Each structure stands twice: as structure tokens, then as C-alpha cells.
Image: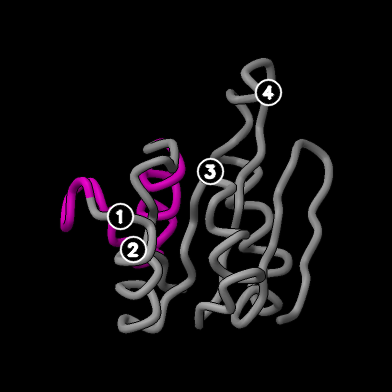
Amino acid sequence: MRFVADESCDFSVVRGLRNSGHNVAAIAEIAPRAVDEEVLKLALQRGTILITEDKDFGQLVFASMKATEGVLLLRFPARARSGLASAVLDLVAKRGDELPGCFAVLQPGRVRIRRR
């Protein structure tokens, strides 16, 4: 699968996905300090799912009705951060085909996938 990882995304997720053969463009590497709307537009132009830890993307996608190829919002508290990358890899392996065109929220032990 192809992804764009927002600067807020823990880089362990980027490394884990890359090591598993996924194509991941990290905003920190290609467009540092880009504003959220630019990040969302870049992911859309590339036809990729955006991975972020920034809740503001929910506002952009739902309230502002911005177009997207899909968003994966990571909501992991500090006590669960060590399992973040493996949880993302597990989600992509088991339910990755459900992510395009959706807004998904991944939390420890739980995932919600909402079609737009």
C-alpha cells in the first residue's frame, strides 16, 4: 500500500511500514512544516492514505468536506506508544483493503473505520 505520513506521525510507523514493503512518503522528508491542508492535498494528489496523529484532519475531512483518498488517525496514549508501529502493521495486514476512501481511527485494541 501507499501512504503519506504527516509530521505528527511517530517515525516508528514510517520505518515499520517501509520495512514491510509499503511505500511511505514522510512529510518531514518531502515537505517539512507544510500546513494540514497542503498535507491532505499532497496525499490526495499522490493517491495515498494519510497517516496522522493530528485530530485536526477530522475537522478538515468532515466539517470542511476536503477530498481525501483516506485518513488513518492514530490515537495512542503515552503508556501504549511502544505498540503503535505493530498495531498499524497489523491493521494494514488484516484490514488494509478497507482503508481507501475511509476515515479510520486506530486506538490500542480498537479500530473504527468510517466510509465517507
Q: Nearer the viewer, mark 2 or mark 1?
A: 1
Between 46 and 90, the one nearer to me in the picture: 46
Amino acid type at mark 3: Glu
Q: State the CA–CA distance, disc 3 to disc 4.
A: 14 Å
Q: Which residue is mark 3?
A: 53
Q: Which residue is mark 1?
A: 35
Residue type at tag 1: Val
Circle 3/circle 1 CB separation < 8 Å: no
Furthest toward the top, the residue is 79
Please state the extent of the stretch shown in magenta in the rendering.
Answer: 12-33
For label 2, the residue is 39
Label 3: element kind = loop
User: Marks 3 and 1, Cα distance to the nearest angstrom?
Assistant: 14 Å
Q: Reply yes or no: does residue 26 show up in magenta.
A: yes
Pinpoint residue 82: horizontal percent, then vertical percent.
Answer: 58, 23
Mark 4 secondary-structure assignment: helix
Mark 2 vs mark 1, CA separation in Å:
6 Å
Q: Secondary structure at mark 2?
A: helix
Q: Of label 3 and label 1, which has the lower sequence position?
A: 1
Determine the image quadrant of residue 98: bottom right
Q: Please give the label number shown on residue 80.
A: 4
Task: Indicate the secondary structure of the residue bearing disc 1.
Answer: loop
Residue 1 to residue 111: above or below: below
* Category of crowding for the residue at label 3, using alpha-carbon neighbours closer than 10 angstroms: few (below 14), some (14–19), many (at least 20): some
User: Would residue 37 appear left or right of 112 to someone viewing this image?
Assistant: left
